[in-house]
C-alpha cells in the first residue's frame, strides 16, 4: 500500500507525495506533467523545451486549465539563455506555481517571481552556494548530488543533504539517486523534505521521445553512465553507447582553450551548448547512429516502459511489483 507523507514540500505545494518529476531537456512535456499531477506529485518543464514564447505560454495555459495540481518551469538563468527575461516574464504573468533556477544567479528571478506570488527553487551543488541563494530569498533548495542525471554535482547525497540541513533553514529537495520506495525513504531519512526524480520517467508512455531512447533506459544500467563535457561545456551524464565511445567524452585541446579564453569563453559555451542540444534532439526523436542519450544512474531501477502513474507507484509503495 502507498505510504503517507507529510513534509515541508507537501505542505508548501499542496501535494500528496514529496516528489518533483524533474524538468528534463527535450523529454518533459505537458502530458507527463499532467500525469504526474494526477498521481499526487508535481512536475516541471524546462522553458527551453519550447522554441518560442507563444509555445511556452500555450503549455502553461494547458497545465493551468488541467487544474490537477501545482507545476513548475525550469529556467536557465545565466547568459547562455538569451530568452531568459521573456521566459521569466511569462512565468510571472501566468503565475506558474514555482520556478526552478539552474546555472546562474537566481537573484532577478527571485525578485520578480515573488512579486507575482511565484515560488523559486534553486539548483545547488554546494553548501556555499546554498547559503547564497537562501540569503537571496529562495523558497527551497534543490540539492543536485553526485547520483543525479544531466548536470550532476560532485558530492553524494549521503554527505550533501546533512551538510545542507545543518547550514540552511529552508526546505531541501534532493536530486539524484532515487528510483524506488527504499531509496526515497533513505533520502528523506537524511533530512531531505522532498526529491526531484528524472531519468526513470524517460521510458514512460507519456514521454515524447522515441522508443529507442526509452528502450536504452531499460537495457542499460548504472555502470553504463559516463560524464561528458561535449554536450554543454559543463560535465553532463549520458549513456555510454558505441557512438559516445567513438567520439570520446572530453573536449579537444582547441575547445578547452577557447572555453578558458576570456574573450571567447561566453561564445564557445553557447556554441557548444547549441551543438550538443541539437545532437541530443536528433538522438531523441529520429533514427540515427549518433546516439547521445542523457540519463543518470537511476536507470538501474528501470525494467520496462510504463505509464507515469506506475513510476510514481514504484516510488511511494513499498509493496510495488511489476
Image: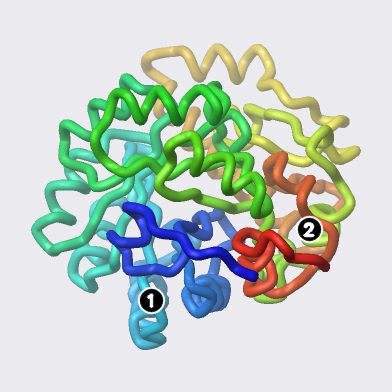
- Compared to 32, does 238 lie above or below? above
| Residue 300, numbered label | none
Residue 47: % across, % down: 41, 59
* Residue pointed to by mark 2: 213
CB atoms of marks 2 and 1 within 8 Å: no
In the rendered image, the vertical position of residue 104 relative to residue 44, given as above or below: above
Residue ID at (73%, 64%): 319
Residue 214 found in image quarter: bottom right
User: In front: mark 2 or mark 1?
Assistant: 1
Asked whether, in this view, residue 109 is left or right of residue 282, the answer is left
Q: Quadrant of residue 31?
A: bottom right
Q: Is residue 234 visible?
A: no
**Residue furthest out toward the left:** 115
Cα distance in 3D space between marks 2 and 1: 29 Å
Residue 57 seen in this snapshot: yes
Residue with the mark numbered 1: 69
Mark 2, other Cα within 10 Å: few <14 / some 14–19 / many ≥20: many
In the image, 33 versus 85, the foreground residue is 33
State the residue in front, 120 or 287: 120
- Expressed as whole percent of the image width and height from the top left, the position of residue 240 reads 82, 36
Residue 137, image x, y percentages: 16, 41
Q: Is residue 115 left or right of residue 166?
A: left
First in residue order: circle 2 vs circle 1: 1
Which percent across, then down, holds residue 43?
A: 47, 64
Residue located at (66% from left, 48% from top)? 182
Amino acid at each position: 500500500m502507498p505510504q503517507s507523507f507529510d513534509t515541508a514540500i507537501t505542505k508548501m505545494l499542496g501535494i500528496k507525495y514529496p516528489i518533483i518529476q524533474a524538468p528534463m531537456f527535450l523529454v518533459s512535456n505537458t502530458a507527463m506533467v499532467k500525469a504526474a499531477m494526477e498521481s499526487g506529485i508535481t512536475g516541471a518543464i524546462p522553458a527551453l523545451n519550447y522554441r518560442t514564447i507563444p509555445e511556452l505560454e500555450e503549455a502553461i495555459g494547458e497545465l493551468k486549465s488541467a487544474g490537477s495540481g501545482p507545476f513548475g518551469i525550469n529556467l536557465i538563468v545565466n547568459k547562455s539563455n538569451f530568452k531568459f527575461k521573456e521566459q521569466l516574464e511569462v512565468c510571472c504573468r501566468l503565475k506558474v506555481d514555482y520556478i526552478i533556477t539552474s546555472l546562474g544567479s537566481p537573484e532577478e528571478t527571485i525578485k520578480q517571481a515573488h512579486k507575482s506570488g511565484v515560488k523559486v527553487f534553486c539548483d545547488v551543488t554546494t553548501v556555499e552556494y546554498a547559503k547564497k541563494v537562501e540569503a537571496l530569498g529562495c523558497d527551497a533548495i534543490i540539492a543536485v548530488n553526485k547520483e543525479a542525471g544531466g548536470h550532476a554535482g560532485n558530492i553524494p547525497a549521503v554527505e550533501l543533504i546533512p551538510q545542507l540541513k545543518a547550514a540552511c533553514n529552508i526546505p531541501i529537495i534532493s536530486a539524484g539517486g532515487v528510483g524506488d520506495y527504499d531509496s526515497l525513504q533513505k533520502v528523506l531519512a537524511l533530512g531531505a523534505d522532498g526529491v526531484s526524480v528524472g531519468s526513470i520517467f524517460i521510458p514512460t508512455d507519456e514521454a515524447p521521445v522515441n522508443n529507442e531512447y526509452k528502450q536504452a533506459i531499460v537495457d542499460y544500467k548504472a555502470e553504463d553512465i559516463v560524464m561528458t563535457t561535449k554536450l554543454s561545456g559543463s560535465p553532463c551524464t549520458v549513456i555510454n553507447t558505441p557512438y559516445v565511445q567513438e567520439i570520446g567524452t572530453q573536449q579537444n585541446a582547441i575547445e578547452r582553450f577557447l572555453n578558458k579564453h576570456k574573450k571567447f569563453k561566453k561564445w564557445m559555451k553557447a556554441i557548444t551548448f547549441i551543438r550538443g542540444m541539437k545532437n541530443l534532439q536528433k538522438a531523441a526523436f529520429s533514427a540515427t547512429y549518433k546516439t547521445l542519450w542523457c540519463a543518470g544512474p537511476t536507470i538501474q531501477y528501470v525494467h520496462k516502459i510504463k505509464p507515469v502513474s506506475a513510476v510514481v507507484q514504484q516510488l511511494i509503495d513499498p509493496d510495488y511489483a511489476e
